[in-house]
Amino acid sequence: MAEALRGGRARVDWPRFTIITSSLDQAPFLIETIHSVRDQRRDDVEHIVLDGGSSDDSVDVLRAHDESLAYWESAPDDGQAAAWNAGVRRARGEIIAFLNSDDVLLPGALDEMERLATAHPAAEWLVGGTRYFGEMAPALEYPGVPQRSAAEVLFFASYAPQPGHFFRRSVFARVGELDETLHYAFDHEFFVRCALAGVPSAATPAIVAGFRFHGASKSVTQRERQMRETLEVEWRHWPEVLGREGRHARAVRADRKGHLALEASRDALMAGHRGRGWRLLARAVREYPSMFRTRAFLGTVQRLMGFRR
């Protein structure tokens, strides 16, 4: 294994925030990520970058920004979850967040999260809003929302994109590390465990982070594998979620499955399979009758009847 390269000269005596960045072969984006943390203009932030042994110019970027980083390392690792865990073990800040090397913090983000943490001292899970951006991004913004129900977290009913999530150090002592056997849904699985552990949450609707979509991102290129892992997380945690939350869990699950069935119906229609689209729609209504009252159901019917494109 190649010898690890290390650096980082930003000395932070009393870090309020630790930002952990994992990276692999994303030098141009990494520059923007580092600048977005540096430009928060706070003296209580330590930024840790763990690079998985990039073959591009990432090490040159890290060396050029040595004075902005509390610690950086470039060496082969066991994946993104392993890098995040290593960052948590090294972190000294009271509040920890994970910012991938193709994502950014928006101006004033940490000031907003500081206000949220101060206003809700008992909250250990702090959620800010996230904006999608980049060459392939849908025009979407998600405000931060509290994460209160394990079922809502498991089935994305209280969805807020990962870059907007911040955690007090106490969470990792209570919940444990991220699951390094997962490569795509490890953050989602960690969120579900936080909800099951009863980690108190607070949120701000302010948009504090940017989630970049681009041709090489895992969210774009490996969508099918990501969905398989998401289903694995569901199978793993559904029995406990159901046992704890009962009727509420069943209702949240039905809404999620119904929306997925509607999406499958629309996909069939777009592929020119109108008959299959109608069959999938009928199945959605039969198995998940709550879909009958939604705008998504009405829109799907209109498309199938040719009233909308």
Image (cartoon, rainbow, N blue to C red):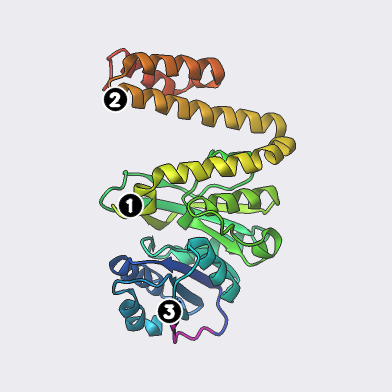
Q: CA distance from mark 2 to mark 1?
A: 24 Å
Query: Is residue 177 toward the left or the right of residue 3 in the image?
Result: right
Please name the amino acid that badge 3 sits on: Ala
Residue 209 shows in the view: yes
Q: Is residue 142 magenta?
A: no
Q: Position of residue 5 (x, y in %)?
A: 42, 82
Residue tagged 3 = 2
Tag 1 near tag 3, CB within 8 Å: no
Q: CA distance from mark 3 to mark 2?
A: 48 Å
Q: Mark 2, residues whose alpha carbon is within 10 Å: few (<14), some, or many (≥20)? A: few
Q: Position of residue 85 (x, y in %)?
A: 57, 67
- Determine whether the residue tagged by mark 2 lies in a helix, strand or loop: loop
Residue tagged 1 = 213
Please name the amino acid that badge 1 sits on: Phe
Residue 149 shows in the view: no
Which corner quadrant holds the N terminus? Answer: bottom left
- Determine whether the residue tagged by mark 3 lies in a helix, strand or loop: loop
Q: Which mark is residue 271?
A: 2
Mark 2 vs mark 1, foreground winner is 2
Please name the amino acid that badge 2 sits on: Ala
Answer with mark 1 or mark 3, whichever residue precedes in sequence. 3
Q: Report the span colored magenta.
A: 4-12
> Which residue is found at the position 46% from the left and 75% from the top?
47
Q: CA distance from mark 1 to mark 3?
A: 31 Å
Q: Mark 1, residues whose alpha carbon is within 10 Å: few (<14), some, or many (≥20)? A: some
Q: Mark 3, residues whose alpha carbon is within 10 Å: few (<14), some, or many (≥20)? A: few
Q: Which mark is residue 203?
A: none
Q: Position of residue 72 (x, y in %)?
A: 45, 78
- Determine whether the residue tagged by mark 1 lies in a helix, strand or loop: loop
Answer with mark 3 or mark 2, whichever residue precedes in sequence. 3
